[in-house]
Image: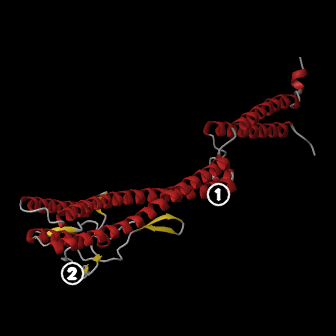
Amino acid sequence: MRITNNMLINNMVYNLNQNLKTMENLQYQLATGKKFRVPSDDPIGASKSLKFSTDISKLTQYKRNAEDAMSWLDDTEAAMAEINQVLKRAYELSVQTANGTYEGEDLIMVREEIEQLKEHLLQIANTTYAGRHIFNGYNTDKPLLIKDNGEIVYNTELKQDEIFQYNVGLAEKIEINTIGIKVFGVVQAGNYEYDVDVNNPSTKPALIDVLDRFSQALAADDDSEIQKTISNLQASMEQLLSVRAEVGAKMNRLELTTKKLDSQINNVTELLSHNEDVDVTEAIMNLSMAQNVYVSSLMTGAKIIQPTLAQFLG
C-alpha cells in the first residue's frame, strides 16, 4: 500500500490530538481532585460512587434522626427529673405533717405549697420539644393537662398506643415518646388505687389527685389520710423511677447507635474517596510522562514528514 504525505500528516495530527486529550484529562484530575467527570469516563467507578453517596446520605439521615430522638429524650428525662423533685418535696411535707406537730398557720402554709407544686406539675406535663408536647401522644399540638373550673384535668382522649418511632438504621426503629398517663395516670399503694378512665378525657391525673387528697387531709387534720399520702407518694416515685429507667435505656441505645452511624459514615466516606479521588502524586507523574510523549510526538512527526522536491530546487 502506498503511503502518502497526507496519510502521514493525518495520522500525526490524530496522535497529537490523542496525546492532548490525555494531557487535558490529567490536568482536569489535578484541578478537581477527581478521577472522572462524567459516567462514561469510568462507568463502573461512577456506579460505585453513586451507591456510596446514596449510602452516606441514608446514614446521615439516620444520624440526624438519632440526634433528634436523643434531644426529645433529653427533654423527657429533664421533665421527669423535675416531677421527681416535686414528689420528693411533697413526700417530705407529708412526713413532716404526719407526726401531728404541724397545726394552724403551719398547715395553711403547707397547703399553699402543695398548690404551687400542683401548678408546677401542670407546667411540666405540658413540656414541649421543638413546639411539640412530649407527653400527649399524637396530639403534640395540644397540652396534656389544662385547668377546667379550677381543676387540673386531662385535655385530650388518652391512648396508650400513640407511640412515635424514629428510623435510626436499616430496619431499626426506636420509640421516643412517653405517654403522659404512664407518668401522671396511675398510682397504686396498699389499699388505695387511682386509675384514669381512658374513655374520659376530663379525668383528673392521679398525681394531681394524690396532692388534692393530701391538701384535703391537711385541711381536715386527718392523720390517717396523711399516712395514705405518704404511701401514695412513695408509689408515685417508684412508678416514675420505672419510666425513667425505660427512657434511660433508650438514651443509652441511641448513644451506641450514633457512634455506630458515625463509624459507618466514616467508612463509606473513605470508600467513596478511594473510588473517585485522584492520587495527586501519580497524576503529576502521569502528566509529566504525557507531556514528554507529546513533545516526542511533535519531534518524531517533524522528522517523518519528508521534504518535498521543491526544497531541493534552486
Give the residue at x 24% y 77%. 157
**Local secondary structure at mark 2:** loop
Regarding residue 297, the answer to whether it shows in the image is yes
Counting from the top left corner in percent of width and height, residue 143 is at 23, 66
Q: Quadrant of residue 190?
A: bottom left
Residue at 6%, 62% in the rendered image: 104
Q: Determine the residue located farthest toward the left in the rendered image.
A: 104
Question: Which residue shows up at 34% across the image and 70% down it?
Answer: 239
Horizontal side of 225 relative to 254 (left or right) equals: left
In this image, 144 relative to 173: left or right? left
Secondary structure under the numbered disc 1 in the rendered image: helix
Residue sitting nearer the eye, 104 or 168: 104
Extreme residue toward the right, this view? 1
Which comes before the other along the chain, label 1 or label 2? Answer: 1
Residue 154 visible: no
Q: Name the residue type under label 2.
A: Asn
Q: Nearer the viewer, mark 1 or mark 2?
A: 2
Please give the label number shown on residue 47.
Answer: 1
- The residue indicated by pointer 2 is 200
21 is higher (above) or lower (below) than 231 = above
The quadrant holding residue 232 is: bottom left
Q: What amino acid is labelled 1 in the image?
A: Ser
